[in-house]
Amino acid sequence: MTFIKPFGFANLSALLVCLAATPALAQTGPQPRLPTATLTLGMHRIVAELAVTAQHQATGMMFRTQMGVSEGMLFVNDDAGVRCFWMRNTLIPLSIAFIDAQGRILNIAEMQPKSDATHCSDGPARYALEMNAGWFAQRQIKPGTRVTGGPLPS
Protein backbone atom coordinates (compact mmCIF):
# COMPACT_ATOMS: atom_id res chain seq x y z
CA MET A 1 0.00 0.00 0.00
CA THR A 2 1.44 3.35 -0.91
CA PHE A 3 0.41 6.40 1.02
CA ILE A 4 0.34 9.91 -0.45
CA LYS A 5 0.70 12.83 1.98
CA PRO A 6 -2.05 15.50 1.77
CA PHE A 7 -1.81 18.42 -0.61
CA GLY A 8 -3.94 20.01 -3.30
CA PHE A 9 -5.68 17.80 -5.83
CA ALA A 10 -4.13 19.90 -8.61
CA ASN A 11 -0.74 18.45 -7.73
CA LEU A 12 -2.04 14.90 -7.27
CA SER A 13 -2.10 14.08 -10.99
CA ALA A 14 1.45 15.30 -11.51
CA LEU A 15 2.66 13.32 -8.52
CA LEU A 16 0.95 10.14 -9.72
CA VAL A 17 2.57 10.46 -13.13
CA CYS A 18 5.99 10.88 -11.51
CA LEU A 19 5.43 8.00 -9.10
CA ALA A 20 4.28 5.71 -11.87
CA ALA A 21 7.60 6.29 -13.63
CA THR A 22 9.66 5.43 -10.53
CA PRO A 23 10.01 2.00 -8.95
CA ALA A 24 8.29 1.31 -5.66
CA LEU A 25 10.38 1.44 -2.52
CA ALA A 26 13.25 -1.02 -2.42
CA GLN A 27 10.96 -3.19 -0.31
CA THR A 28 10.63 -6.62 -1.91
CA GLY A 29 8.74 -8.44 0.80
CA PRO A 30 6.32 -7.72 3.62
CA GLN A 31 7.62 -5.56 6.43
CA PRO A 32 7.76 -7.10 9.89
CA ARG A 33 4.58 -6.72 11.94
CA LEU A 34 4.26 -3.29 13.47
CA PRO A 35 3.24 -2.43 17.04
CA THR A 36 -0.50 -2.90 17.55
CA ALA A 37 -3.41 -1.25 19.33
CA THR A 38 -6.92 -2.48 20.01
CA LEU A 39 -9.62 -0.42 18.29
CA THR A 40 -13.38 -0.56 18.81
CA LEU A 41 -16.14 0.08 16.26
CA GLY A 42 -19.43 -0.44 18.08
CA MET A 43 -19.33 -4.04 19.33
CA HIS A 44 -16.40 -4.99 17.07
CA ARG A 45 -12.80 -5.14 18.27
CA ILE A 46 -9.84 -4.90 15.93
CA VAL A 47 -6.15 -5.48 16.54
CA ALA A 48 -4.58 -2.89 14.25
CA GLU A 49 -0.94 -2.53 13.36
CA LEU A 50 0.08 1.13 13.67
CA ALA A 51 1.74 2.65 10.60
CA VAL A 52 3.08 5.90 12.01
CA THR A 53 6.39 6.56 10.25
CA ALA A 54 6.61 7.64 6.61
CA GLN A 55 8.42 4.39 5.75
CA HIS A 56 5.80 2.18 7.41
CA GLN A 57 3.00 4.14 5.72
CA ALA A 58 4.66 3.91 2.30
CA THR A 59 4.99 0.12 2.64
CA GLY A 60 1.71 -0.56 4.44
CA MET A 61 0.28 -3.97 3.50
CA MET A 62 2.54 -4.46 0.45
CA PHE A 63 3.54 -8.05 -0.33
CA ARG A 64 1.45 -9.58 2.45
CA THR A 65 -0.62 -12.60 1.49
CA GLN A 66 -3.13 -12.62 4.36
CA MET A 67 -4.58 -10.69 7.25
CA GLY A 68 -6.62 -12.05 10.14
CA VAL A 69 -10.40 -11.54 10.27
CA SER A 70 -10.24 -8.98 13.10
CA GLU A 71 -6.86 -7.52 12.17
CA GLY A 72 -6.10 -4.35 10.28
CA MET A 73 -3.62 -1.55 9.76
CA LEU A 74 -4.19 1.97 11.08
CA PHE A 75 -2.32 4.80 9.36
CA VAL A 76 -1.75 7.58 11.90
CA ASN A 77 -0.93 11.16 10.85
CA ASP A 78 -0.05 14.23 12.88
CA ASP A 79 -2.61 16.37 11.09
CA ALA A 80 -5.82 16.00 9.12
CA GLY A 81 -5.82 16.33 5.34
CA VAL A 82 -7.06 14.66 2.19
CA ARG A 83 -5.44 11.20 2.16
CA CYS A 84 -5.07 9.02 -0.93
CA PHE A 85 -4.01 5.38 -1.21
CA TRP A 86 -3.35 2.87 -3.98
CA MET A 87 -2.67 -0.86 -4.02
CA ARG A 88 0.57 -1.23 -5.98
CA ASN A 89 2.38 -4.35 -4.72
CA THR A 90 -0.50 -5.17 -2.39
CA LEU A 91 -1.60 -8.75 -2.95
CA ILE A 92 -4.88 -8.97 -1.03
CA PRO A 93 -8.09 -6.96 -1.58
CA LEU A 94 -8.73 -4.42 1.16
CA SER A 95 -11.38 -2.02 2.41
CA ILE A 96 -10.23 1.33 3.73
CA ALA A 97 -12.05 3.65 6.11
CA PHE A 98 -10.89 7.26 6.18
CA ILE A 99 -11.31 8.67 9.69
CA ASP A 100 -11.37 12.31 10.82
CA ALA A 101 -9.51 13.80 13.81
CA GLN A 102 -12.53 13.12 16.06
CA GLY A 103 -12.54 9.41 15.21
CA ARG A 104 -15.56 9.40 12.85
CA ILE A 105 -15.47 7.50 9.56
CA LEU A 106 -15.70 9.92 6.62
CA ASN A 107 -15.95 7.36 3.81
CA ILE A 108 -15.10 3.76 3.00
CA ALA A 109 -13.56 2.48 -0.24
CA GLU A 110 -13.05 -1.01 -1.65
CA MET A 111 -9.56 -1.50 -3.13
CA GLN A 112 -8.42 -4.17 -5.56
CA PRO A 113 -4.96 -5.79 -5.35
CA LYS A 114 -2.08 -4.70 -7.59
CA SER A 115 -3.88 -1.55 -8.73
CA ASP A 116 -2.66 2.03 -9.14
CA ALA A 117 -6.23 3.36 -8.88
CA THR A 118 -6.32 5.98 -6.14
CA HIS A 119 -8.82 6.01 -3.29
CA CYS A 120 -9.08 9.32 -1.42
CA SER A 121 -10.82 10.60 1.68
CA ASP A 122 -13.96 12.70 1.19
CA GLY A 123 -12.57 15.30 3.58
CA PRO A 124 -9.74 15.94 6.02
CA ALA A 125 -8.71 12.58 7.49
CA ARG A 126 -6.16 12.06 10.22
CA TYR A 127 -6.39 8.26 10.15
CA ALA A 128 -7.04 5.50 7.64
CA LEU A 129 -7.96 1.95 8.65
CA GLU A 130 -7.35 -0.93 6.23
CA MET A 131 -9.25 -4.19 6.74
CA ASN A 132 -9.91 -7.25 4.61
CA ALA A 133 -12.20 -6.47 1.65
CA GLY A 134 -15.84 -6.23 2.65
CA TRP A 135 -15.14 -6.10 6.39
CA PHE A 136 -17.03 -2.83 6.98
CA ALA A 137 -19.98 -3.75 4.71
CA GLN A 138 -20.38 -7.19 6.30
CA ARG A 139 -20.74 -5.51 9.69
CA GLN A 140 -22.94 -2.66 8.39
CA ILE A 141 -20.35 -0.09 9.44
CA LYS A 142 -20.92 3.14 7.55
CA PRO A 143 -19.65 6.74 7.42
CA GLY A 144 -20.35 8.49 10.71
CA THR A 145 -19.44 5.44 12.81
CA ARG A 146 -17.04 6.31 15.59
CA VAL A 147 -13.74 4.45 16.02
CA THR A 148 -12.04 4.48 19.44
CA GLY A 149 -8.93 3.02 21.04
CA GLY A 150 -5.22 3.24 20.46
CA PRO A 151 -4.19 6.69 19.24
CA LEU A 152 -7.77 7.73 18.36
CA PRO A 153 -9.65 10.16 20.62
CA SER A 154 -11.68 8.47 23.36
Image: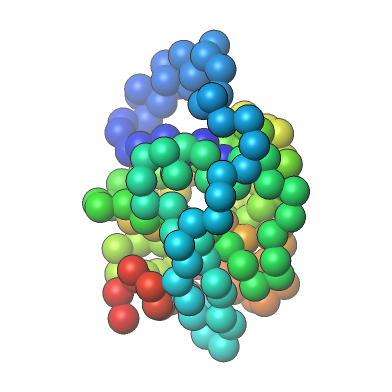
If the image is split into quadrants, where does the N terminus sit? top right
Q: Residue furthest bottom?
A: 43
Q: Residue at x 62, y 43 (%)?
A: 30
Q: Residue furthest left?
A: 79
Residue 37 can be seen in this image: yes
Looking at the picture, how far across and down is residue 45, in whole percent?
A: 56, 81
Relative placement, left or right, of 114 versus 85 is right
Q: Nearer the viewer, residue 31 or 135?
A: 31
Q: How is the image coloured?
A: rainbow
Residue 124 can be seen in this image: no
If the image is split into quadrants, where does the C terminus sit? bottom left
Q: Residue at x 58, y 62 (%)?
A: 72
Looking at the picture, how far across and down is residue 36, in whole percent?
A: 47, 67
Looking at the picture, how far across and down is residue 140, in whole percent?
A: 65, 75
Q: Residue at x 35, y 22 (%)?
A: 11
Up the image or down, 90 lies above or below 126; here it is: above
Q: Residue at x 51, y 26 (%)?
A: 25
Q: Nearer the viewer, residue 74 or 37?
A: 37
* Residue 134 occupies quadrant: bottom right
Relative placement, left or right, of 48 versus 136 is left
* Residue 86 occupies quadrant: top right
Q: Nearer the viewer, residue 131 or 14?
A: 131
Looking at the picture, how far across and down is residue 125, in whole percent?
A: 36, 54
Count the marks.
Answer: 0
Relative placement, left or right, of 11 versus 111 is left
